[in-house]
Amino acid sequence: MIRGVEVRRARIALVSPFRTSFGTETGRELLYLRVAGDEGRDSAAGGGTAGVDAWGVADGWGECVAMSEPGYSSEYVDGCEDVLRRFLLPLVGPDTTAAAFHDAARAVRGHAMAKATLETALLDRDLRLAGTSLAAHLGATRTRVPSGVSVGIQPDIPTLLRVVGAHLDEGYVRIKLKIEPGWDLEPVAAVRREYGHDVPLQVDANAAYTVAHAGHLARLDDHGLLLIEQPLPEDDVWGHAVLARTVRTPICLDESITSLEVARGAIEAGACAIINIKPGRVGGYLEARRIHDLCVERGVPVWCGGMLETGVGRAANLALAAMPGFTLPGDTSASARYFARDVTEPFVLREGGIDVPQGPGIGVRPIPEVLDAITERSDMVRVGANRAAR
Ligand code: OSB
Ligand code: MG
Protein backbone atom coordinates (compact mmCIF):
# COMPACT_ATOMS: atom_id res chain seq x y z
CA MET A 1 0.00 0.00 0.00
CA ILE A 2 1.06 3.57 -0.64
CA ARG A 3 1.68 5.25 2.72
CA GLY A 4 2.55 8.70 1.50
CA VAL A 5 4.42 10.76 -1.04
CA GLU A 6 7.62 12.51 -0.09
CA VAL A 7 8.04 15.96 -1.66
CA ARG A 8 11.69 16.91 -1.85
CA ARG A 9 13.18 20.17 -3.06
CA ALA A 10 16.84 20.40 -3.92
CA ARG A 11 19.30 22.47 -5.92
CA ILE A 12 22.23 21.34 -8.05
CA ALA A 13 24.81 23.44 -9.95
CA LEU A 14 25.45 22.95 -13.67
CA VAL A 15 29.09 22.43 -14.70
CA SER A 16 28.73 25.39 -17.07
CA PRO A 17 25.99 27.98 -17.68
CA PHE A 18 23.44 26.89 -20.29
CA ARG A 19 22.17 29.80 -22.40
CA THR A 20 19.14 29.54 -24.67
CA SER A 21 16.97 32.13 -26.40
CA PHE A 22 14.76 32.15 -23.27
CA GLY A 23 17.41 32.56 -20.58
CA THR A 24 20.55 31.33 -18.87
CA GLU A 25 20.54 28.44 -16.39
CA THR A 26 23.44 28.10 -13.95
CA GLY A 27 21.80 25.40 -11.84
CA ARG A 28 18.65 23.33 -11.55
CA GLU A 29 16.01 23.83 -8.89
CA LEU A 30 14.78 20.30 -8.39
CA LEU A 31 11.53 18.74 -7.26
CA TYR A 32 11.50 15.00 -6.62
CA LEU A 33 8.58 12.87 -5.56
CA ARG A 34 8.99 9.55 -3.80
CA VAL A 35 5.84 7.45 -3.61
CA ALA A 36 6.44 5.44 -0.46
CA GLY A 37 4.93 1.96 -0.35
CA ASP A 38 5.07 -0.43 2.58
CA GLU A 39 5.27 -3.76 0.69
CA GLY A 40 8.25 -5.78 1.85
CA ARG A 41 9.01 -3.48 4.78
CA ASP A 42 9.70 -4.96 8.21
CA SER A 43 8.64 -1.89 10.12
CA ALA A 44 6.63 1.21 9.36
CA ALA A 45 9.71 3.39 9.86
CA GLY A 46 10.85 3.38 6.21
CA GLY A 47 13.37 5.49 4.27
CA GLY A 48 16.62 5.80 6.17
CA THR A 49 19.63 7.72 4.92
CA ALA A 50 22.45 5.17 4.88
CA GLY A 51 23.24 2.99 1.87
CA VAL A 52 21.76 2.71 -1.60
CA ASP A 53 19.09 0.31 -0.36
CA ALA A 54 17.68 2.79 2.12
CA TRP A 55 14.67 3.40 -0.11
CA GLY A 56 12.14 0.59 0.10
CA VAL A 57 11.60 -1.78 -2.82
CA ALA A 58 8.06 -0.50 -3.21
CA ASP A 59 9.07 3.17 -3.46
CA GLY A 60 8.80 5.00 -6.79
CA TRP A 61 10.64 8.10 -7.94
CA GLY A 62 9.80 10.99 -10.22
CA GLU A 63 11.77 14.12 -11.14
CA CYS A 64 10.00 17.30 -12.21
CA VAL A 65 11.44 18.82 -15.41
CA ALA A 66 10.03 22.33 -14.92
CA MET A 67 12.60 25.11 -14.65
CA SER A 68 12.69 27.86 -12.00
CA GLU A 69 10.97 30.32 -14.33
CA PRO A 70 8.25 29.95 -17.00
CA GLY A 71 10.65 30.68 -19.89
CA TYR A 72 10.58 27.38 -21.79
CA SER A 73 6.88 26.78 -21.15
CA SER A 74 4.24 28.16 -18.80
CA GLU A 75 5.13 25.74 -16.02
CA TYR A 76 7.72 26.50 -13.32
CA VAL A 77 8.88 24.36 -10.46
CA ASP A 78 7.22 26.23 -7.55
CA GLY A 79 3.96 26.20 -9.53
CA CYS A 80 4.30 22.46 -10.06
CA GLU A 81 4.73 21.92 -6.34
CA ASP A 82 1.60 23.97 -5.69
CA VAL A 83 -0.61 22.11 -8.18
CA LEU A 84 0.77 18.79 -6.98
CA ARG A 85 0.01 19.53 -3.33
CA ARG A 86 -3.40 21.09 -3.92
CA PHE A 87 -4.86 19.06 -6.78
CA LEU A 88 -2.77 16.05 -7.85
CA LEU A 89 -1.46 14.40 -4.67
CA PRO A 90 -5.02 14.32 -3.27
CA LEU A 91 -5.93 12.00 -6.18
CA VAL A 92 -3.58 9.33 -4.84
CA GLY A 93 -4.99 6.64 -2.56
CA PRO A 94 -3.39 3.55 -1.00
CA ASP A 95 -3.75 1.48 -4.21
CA THR A 96 -3.41 4.09 -6.97
CA THR A 97 -1.55 2.89 -10.06
CA ALA A 98 0.06 5.14 -12.67
CA ALA A 99 -2.67 4.27 -15.18
CA ALA A 100 -5.44 5.09 -12.68
CA PHE A 101 -3.77 8.37 -11.79
CA HIS A 102 -3.41 9.21 -15.50
CA ASP A 103 -7.18 8.88 -15.93
CA ALA A 104 -8.07 10.75 -12.73
CA ALA A 105 -5.68 13.59 -13.56
CA ARG A 106 -7.61 14.41 -16.74
CA ALA A 107 -9.90 16.46 -14.49
CA VAL A 108 -7.02 18.88 -13.90
CA ARG A 109 -6.37 20.94 -17.05
CA GLY A 110 -2.83 21.48 -18.22
CA HIS A 111 0.11 21.19 -15.79
CA ALA A 112 1.73 18.41 -17.81
CA MET A 113 5.08 18.60 -16.00
CA ALA A 114 3.49 18.36 -12.57
CA LYS A 115 1.37 15.39 -13.69
CA ALA A 116 4.36 13.67 -15.31
CA THR A 117 6.33 13.87 -12.06
CA LEU A 118 3.70 12.05 -10.03
CA GLU A 119 2.71 9.63 -12.78
CA THR A 120 6.35 8.61 -13.26
CA ALA A 121 6.84 8.03 -9.53
CA LEU A 122 3.72 5.84 -9.48
CA LEU A 123 4.84 4.00 -12.62
CA ASP A 124 8.30 3.37 -11.15
CA ARG A 125 6.61 1.88 -8.08
CA ASP A 126 4.13 -0.22 -10.14
CA LEU A 127 6.95 -1.65 -12.24
CA ARG A 128 9.25 -2.34 -9.28
CA LEU A 129 6.47 -4.35 -7.65
CA ALA A 130 5.99 -6.24 -10.92
CA GLY A 131 9.76 -6.71 -11.38
CA THR A 132 9.61 -5.13 -14.86
CA SER A 133 11.92 -2.47 -16.25
CA LEU A 134 10.44 0.72 -17.70
CA ALA A 135 12.30 -0.09 -20.93
CA ALA A 136 10.57 -3.48 -21.20
CA HIS A 137 7.22 -1.95 -20.23
CA LEU A 138 7.48 0.64 -23.02
CA GLY A 139 8.58 -1.93 -25.61
CA ALA A 140 12.20 -0.82 -25.93
CA THR A 141 14.19 -2.70 -28.53
CA ARG A 142 17.73 -1.45 -27.77
CA THR A 143 20.01 -1.65 -24.75
CA ARG A 144 22.10 1.41 -25.60
CA VAL A 145 20.95 4.65 -27.21
CA PRO A 146 23.08 6.99 -29.35
CA SER A 147 23.72 10.24 -27.57
CA GLY A 148 23.61 13.80 -28.88
CA VAL A 149 24.49 16.96 -27.01
CA SER A 150 22.81 20.36 -26.86
CA VAL A 151 25.23 23.28 -26.99
CA GLY A 152 24.07 26.59 -25.52
CA ILE A 153 24.52 30.03 -27.04
CA GLN A 154 28.19 30.96 -26.55
CA PRO A 155 29.84 34.34 -26.00
CA ASP A 156 31.74 34.12 -29.33
CA ILE A 157 32.57 31.81 -32.24
CA PRO A 158 36.02 30.64 -31.00
CA THR A 159 34.44 29.54 -27.70
CA LEU A 160 31.68 27.74 -29.60
CA LEU A 161 34.19 25.87 -31.75
CA ARG A 162 36.13 24.79 -28.65
CA VAL A 163 32.98 23.53 -26.91
CA VAL A 164 31.76 21.65 -30.00
CA GLY A 165 35.23 20.16 -30.57
CA ALA A 166 35.40 18.92 -26.99
CA HIS A 167 31.99 17.20 -27.32
CA LEU A 168 33.01 15.56 -30.61
CA ASP A 169 36.20 14.32 -28.92
CA GLU A 170 34.10 12.88 -26.10
CA GLY A 171 32.20 10.85 -28.71
CA TYR A 172 28.81 12.54 -29.01
CA VAL A 173 27.25 11.46 -32.29
CA ARG A 174 25.17 14.57 -32.95
CA ILE A 175 25.51 18.25 -32.12
CA LYS A 176 22.60 20.61 -31.52
CA LEU A 177 23.26 24.34 -31.48
CA LYS A 178 20.94 26.70 -29.64
CA ILE A 179 20.13 29.66 -31.90
CA GLU A 180 18.36 33.02 -31.71
CA PRO A 181 18.21 36.09 -33.99
CA GLY A 182 21.82 37.33 -34.18
CA TRP A 183 23.27 33.88 -33.34
CA ASP A 184 22.25 31.54 -36.15
CA LEU A 185 23.82 31.59 -39.64
CA GLU A 186 27.31 32.47 -38.41
CA PRO A 187 27.71 29.81 -35.71
CA VAL A 188 26.29 27.12 -38.02
CA ALA A 189 28.64 28.13 -40.85
CA ALA A 190 31.60 28.23 -38.44
CA VAL A 191 30.91 24.72 -37.13
CA ARG A 192 30.57 23.41 -40.69
CA ARG A 193 33.82 25.13 -41.76
CA GLU A 194 35.76 23.75 -38.76
CA TYR A 195 34.30 20.23 -38.46
CA GLY A 196 32.95 19.51 -41.94
CA HIS A 197 29.61 18.47 -43.39
CA ASP A 198 29.58 14.92 -42.05
CA VAL A 199 28.89 15.95 -38.44
CA PRO A 200 25.17 15.36 -37.74
CA LEU A 201 24.11 18.90 -36.86
CA GLN A 202 20.81 20.55 -35.93
CA VAL A 203 19.59 23.79 -34.37
CA ASP A 204 17.03 24.73 -31.71
CA ALA A 205 15.49 28.23 -31.55
CA ASN A 206 13.18 27.73 -28.56
CA ALA A 207 10.50 29.83 -30.28
CA ALA A 208 12.71 32.89 -30.88
CA TYR A 209 11.54 33.69 -34.44
CA THR A 210 8.36 34.71 -36.29
CA VAL A 211 7.02 33.72 -39.70
CA ALA A 212 8.53 36.99 -40.98
CA HIS A 213 11.96 35.32 -40.52
CA ALA A 214 11.12 32.60 -43.07
CA GLY A 215 13.51 33.96 -45.70
CA HIS A 216 16.28 34.29 -43.15
CA LEU A 217 15.80 30.77 -41.79
CA ALA A 218 15.82 29.38 -45.34
CA ARG A 219 19.46 30.46 -45.52
CA LEU A 220 20.21 27.59 -43.09
CA ASP A 221 19.24 25.19 -45.91
CA ASP A 222 22.74 25.26 -47.43
CA HIS A 223 24.28 23.75 -44.29
CA GLY A 224 22.71 20.29 -44.46
CA LEU A 225 21.10 20.40 -41.01
CA LEU A 226 19.10 17.42 -39.74
CA LEU A 227 16.34 19.74 -38.57
CA ILE A 228 15.33 23.13 -37.21
CA GLU A 229 13.69 22.72 -33.79
CA GLN A 230 10.82 24.96 -32.67
CA PRO A 231 11.59 28.14 -34.61
CA LEU A 232 8.22 29.80 -33.79
CA PRO A 233 6.11 30.25 -30.65
CA GLU A 234 4.46 27.23 -29.03
CA ASP A 235 0.93 28.21 -30.10
CA ASP A 236 1.83 28.88 -33.73
CA VAL A 237 1.29 25.46 -35.27
CA TRP A 238 -0.10 27.02 -38.47
CA GLY A 239 2.92 29.34 -38.71
CA HIS A 240 5.20 26.29 -38.66
CA ALA A 241 3.18 24.79 -41.52
CA VAL A 242 3.67 28.01 -43.53
CA LEU A 243 7.38 28.07 -42.67
CA ALA A 244 7.77 24.44 -43.74
CA ARG A 245 6.77 25.47 -47.27
CA THR A 246 9.60 28.04 -47.48
CA VAL A 247 12.39 26.23 -45.62
CA ARG A 248 13.74 22.95 -47.02
CA THR A 249 15.36 21.81 -43.75
CA PRO A 250 12.87 19.61 -41.84
CA ILE A 251 10.96 21.43 -39.11
CA CYS A 252 10.88 19.64 -35.73
CA LEU A 253 8.50 20.65 -32.96
CA ASP A 254 9.32 20.60 -29.25
CA GLU A 255 7.34 23.16 -27.17
CA SER A 256 4.25 22.94 -29.43
CA ILE A 257 3.72 19.22 -28.92
CA THR A 258 1.86 19.07 -25.62
CA SER A 259 -0.34 16.01 -26.25
CA LEU A 260 -1.20 13.21 -28.65
CA GLU A 261 -3.99 15.35 -30.15
CA VAL A 262 -1.69 18.30 -30.82
CA ALA A 263 0.87 15.94 -32.35
CA ARG A 264 -1.76 14.51 -34.69
CA GLY A 265 -2.92 18.00 -35.70
CA ALA A 266 0.62 19.26 -36.29
CA ILE A 267 1.44 16.29 -38.51
CA GLU A 268 -1.83 16.66 -40.46
CA ALA A 269 -1.23 20.40 -40.89
CA GLY A 270 2.27 19.81 -42.25
CA ALA A 271 3.76 21.82 -39.39
CA CYS A 272 6.51 19.31 -38.61
CA ALA A 273 8.35 16.44 -40.27
CA ILE A 274 10.01 15.36 -37.01
CA ILE A 275 8.94 15.43 -33.34
CA ASN A 276 11.00 15.86 -30.18
CA ILE A 277 9.27 13.85 -27.45
CA LYS A 278 9.74 15.00 -23.85
CA PRO A 279 7.66 13.04 -21.36
CA GLY A 280 7.49 15.98 -18.95
CA ARG A 281 6.07 18.28 -21.62
CA VAL A 282 3.31 15.82 -22.63
CA GLY A 283 2.27 14.73 -19.13
CA GLY A 284 4.21 11.50 -18.72
CA TYR A 285 5.59 8.32 -20.26
CA LEU A 286 2.16 6.86 -21.07
CA GLU A 287 1.30 9.84 -23.31
CA ALA A 288 4.86 9.87 -24.68
CA ARG A 289 4.41 6.25 -25.77
CA ARG A 290 1.14 7.10 -27.54
CA ILE A 291 2.83 9.94 -29.44
CA HIS A 292 5.68 7.59 -30.38
CA ASP A 293 3.17 5.03 -31.69
CA LEU A 294 1.31 7.68 -33.74
CA CYS A 295 4.58 8.90 -35.25
CA VAL A 296 5.66 5.37 -36.19
CA GLU A 297 2.29 4.87 -37.88
CA ARG A 298 2.65 8.18 -39.76
CA GLY A 299 6.33 7.70 -40.66
CA VAL A 300 7.42 10.71 -38.58
CA PRO A 301 10.85 10.24 -36.96
CA VAL A 302 11.04 11.06 -33.26
CA TRP A 303 13.85 11.67 -30.81
CA CYS A 304 14.02 12.09 -27.06
CA GLY A 305 14.57 15.62 -25.79
CA GLY A 306 16.00 16.59 -22.46
CA MET A 307 15.40 19.16 -19.74
CA LEU A 308 18.78 19.05 -17.97
CA GLU A 309 17.52 16.15 -15.85
CA THR A 310 19.50 14.52 -13.09
CA GLY A 311 19.89 10.73 -13.10
CA VAL A 312 16.31 10.03 -11.95
CA GLY A 313 14.77 11.74 -14.98
CA ARG A 314 17.58 10.71 -17.32
CA ALA A 315 17.13 6.99 -16.53
CA ALA A 316 13.48 7.09 -17.56
CA ASN A 317 14.25 9.09 -20.72
CA LEU A 318 16.79 6.46 -21.79
CA ALA A 319 14.14 3.75 -21.51
CA LEU A 320 11.84 5.78 -23.76
CA ALA A 321 14.62 6.58 -26.24
CA ALA A 322 15.26 2.83 -26.64
CA MET A 323 11.87 2.39 -28.38
CA PRO A 324 12.03 1.59 -32.10
CA GLY A 325 10.60 4.88 -33.45
CA PHE A 326 13.39 6.92 -31.85
CA THR A 327 15.49 6.89 -35.00
CA LEU A 328 17.41 10.15 -34.38
CA PRO A 329 19.93 10.66 -31.55
CA GLY A 330 18.41 12.42 -28.55
CA ASP A 331 19.57 15.05 -26.06
CA THR A 332 20.21 12.25 -23.58
CA SER A 333 23.79 13.19 -22.73
CA ALA A 334 26.06 11.79 -20.03
CA SER A 335 25.75 13.01 -16.42
CA ALA A 336 29.13 14.76 -16.67
CA ARG A 337 27.82 17.11 -19.38
CA TYR A 338 25.58 18.67 -16.72
CA PHE A 339 26.74 17.90 -13.18
CA ALA A 340 29.98 17.39 -11.25
CA ARG A 341 28.15 14.74 -9.20
CA ASP A 342 24.83 13.32 -10.36
CA VAL A 343 22.30 12.21 -7.71
CA THR A 344 22.36 8.63 -9.06
CA GLU A 345 25.29 6.57 -10.27
CA PRO A 346 26.50 8.63 -13.23
CA PHE A 347 25.43 7.86 -16.80
CA VAL A 348 28.53 7.61 -18.97
CA LEU A 349 29.10 7.82 -22.70
CA ARG A 350 30.34 4.56 -24.28
CA GLU A 351 30.91 4.32 -28.02
CA GLY A 352 28.72 7.34 -28.60
CA GLY A 353 25.82 6.02 -26.56
CA ILE A 354 24.44 5.49 -23.08
CA ASP A 355 23.31 2.17 -21.67
CA VAL A 356 19.60 1.84 -20.92
CA PRO A 357 18.93 0.87 -17.29
CA GLN A 358 17.64 -2.70 -17.12
CA GLY A 359 16.58 -3.04 -13.48
CA PRO A 360 12.95 -2.90 -12.31
CA GLY A 361 11.16 0.44 -12.75
CA ILE A 362 13.41 3.28 -13.86
CA GLY A 363 16.32 1.08 -12.79
CA VAL A 364 18.14 3.62 -10.64
CA ARG A 365 17.80 5.28 -7.25
CA PRO A 366 19.24 8.50 -5.86
CA ILE A 367 22.28 7.93 -3.67
CA PRO A 368 20.96 8.98 -0.26
CA GLU A 369 24.05 10.92 0.90
CA VAL A 370 24.32 12.76 -2.42
CA LEU A 371 20.64 13.62 -2.47
CA ASP A 372 20.63 14.68 1.20
CA ALA A 373 23.61 16.98 0.56
CA ILE A 374 21.69 19.01 -2.07
CA THR A 375 18.26 18.84 -0.40
CA GLU A 376 16.79 22.11 0.82
CA ARG A 377 13.63 20.67 2.38
CA SER A 378 11.42 17.62 2.28
CA ASP A 379 8.19 16.43 3.83
CA MET A 380 5.88 13.44 3.60
CA VAL A 381 2.35 14.05 2.37
CA ARG A 382 0.13 11.32 3.82
CA VAL A 383 -2.11 9.57 1.33
CA GLY A 384 -5.71 10.69 1.76
CA ALA A 385 -4.68 13.45 4.17
CA ASN A 386 -5.70 16.29 1.85
CA ARG A 387 -8.99 14.85 0.73
CA ALA A 388 -11.15 16.51 3.37
CA ALA A 389 -9.75 19.86 2.29
CA ARG A 390 -11.06 19.63 -1.25
O1 OSB B 1 14.55 23.08 -25.88
O2 OSB B 1 15.39 21.16 -25.87
C1 OSB B 1 15.21 22.23 -25.30
C2 OSB B 1 17.14 22.31 -22.01
C3 OSB B 1 16.21 22.91 -21.18
C4 OSB B 1 15.01 23.31 -21.69
C5 OSB B 1 14.72 23.10 -23.04
C6 OSB B 1 15.64 22.49 -23.88
C7 OSB B 1 16.88 22.12 -23.35
C8 OSB B 1 17.95 21.54 -24.16
C9 OSB B 1 18.97 20.67 -23.49
O3 OSB B 1 18.10 21.77 -25.34
C10 OSB B 1 18.49 19.27 -23.34
C11 OSB B 1 19.36 18.47 -22.42
O4 OSB B 1 20.53 18.30 -22.70
O5 OSB B 1 18.83 17.98 -21.39
MG1 MG C 1 14.00 22.26 -27.74
Image: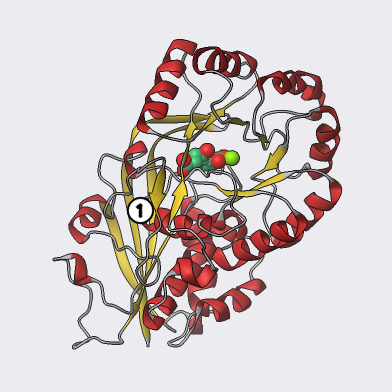
Rendered position, 109 above or below 156: below
Between 20 and 158, which is closer to the camera in this rendering? Answer: 158
Q: Is mark 1 within 8 Å of ligand 1?
A: no
Residue placed under numbered mark 1 in the picture: 311
Rendered position, 186 above or below 178: above
Looking at the rendered structure, the secondary structure element under dot 1 is helix
Q: Is residue 191 left or right of residue 29?
A: right
Q: Is residue 261 left or right of residue 246?
A: left
At a point 63% along the width and 31% down the height, the residue shown is 205
Residue 112, percent from left and from top: 59, 60
Quadrant housing the C terminus: bottom right
Rendered position, 38 above or below 88: below
Residue 336, percent from left and from top: 31, 39
Q: Is residue 250 left or right of residue 108?
A: right
* Residue 150 in sight from this viewpoint: yes
Residue 143 sits in quarter: bottom left
Query: How many marks do you count on the picture?
Result: 1
Residue 298, percent from left and from top: 77, 56
At a point 52% along the width and 54% down the height, the residue shown is 321
Residue at the left extreme of this rendering = 50
- Tell me the amino acid under the disc marked 1: Gly
Residue 164 sits in quarter: top left
Residue 165, percent from left and from top: 41, 21
